[in-house]
Image (tube, helix red, strand yellow):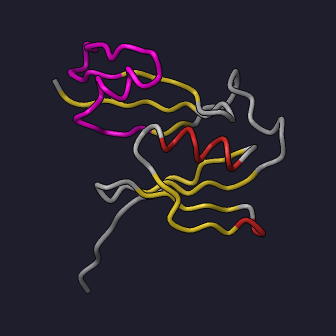
Amino acid sequence: MDFKHSAVAIVPSEDLDSSAAFYARLGFGVTSDYAAHGYRILHDAGGASVHLTRVEAGTIDPAVTAHGIYFYSEEVAALAEAFGLRAEAKPWGLTEFAVSDPSGVLVRVGWPG
């Protein structure tokens, strides 16, 4: 049997519209919207995908939440600027920046170099 794999992050969202707008700044667009079920699927031009799932307000506490999502993008500097940030060279060989989405989920973007 020949399996092909990909991974998709399921990201909690207190407000699907705000979250979709945030991820649009990273190049993602809504491709499927299941509003009645509190679920949206987003894709970017490179084939990456993020699934947003609605959660109750106050469910996510950024001070104690240990999850996040990491995106690799050659456009790390331009994406950082879109958030008013600068990408920084890290000792582990990546240039990256970090930001929280509207629900407090850690989002880190980086690229080797």
Q: Nearer the viewer, residue 44 or 51?
A: 44
- Relative to 110, is 2 above or below? below
Residue at left offset 38%, top offset 20%? 81
Q: Nearer the viewer, residue 47 or 1?
A: 47
**Residue 108 x/y as whole percent:** 43, 30
**Residue 13 x/y as whole percent:** 69, 46
Q: Is residue 113 left or right of residue 17?
A: left
Residue at left offset 38%, top offset 23%? 80
Q: Is residue 34 left or right of residue 107?
A: right
Residue at left offset 33%, top offset 22%? 96
Which range is magenta?
70-96
Q: Nearer the viewer, residue 54 or 23?
A: 23
Residue at left offset 20%, top offset 21%? 93
Find out whether residue 81 is within the magenta segment: yes
Quarter that holds the N terminus: bottom left
Quarter that holds the C terminus: top left
Q: Is residue 15 left or right of residue 8?
A: right
Q: Is residue 91 left or right of residue 23?
A: left
**Residue 11 x/y as whole percent:** 60, 48
Q: In this figure, what is the number of numbered marks?
A: 0
Residue 39 occupies quadrant? bottom right
- Relative to 16, is 68 above or below? above
**Farthest bottom residue in view:** 1
Find out whether residue 42 is within the magenta segment: no
**Farthest left residue in view:** 113
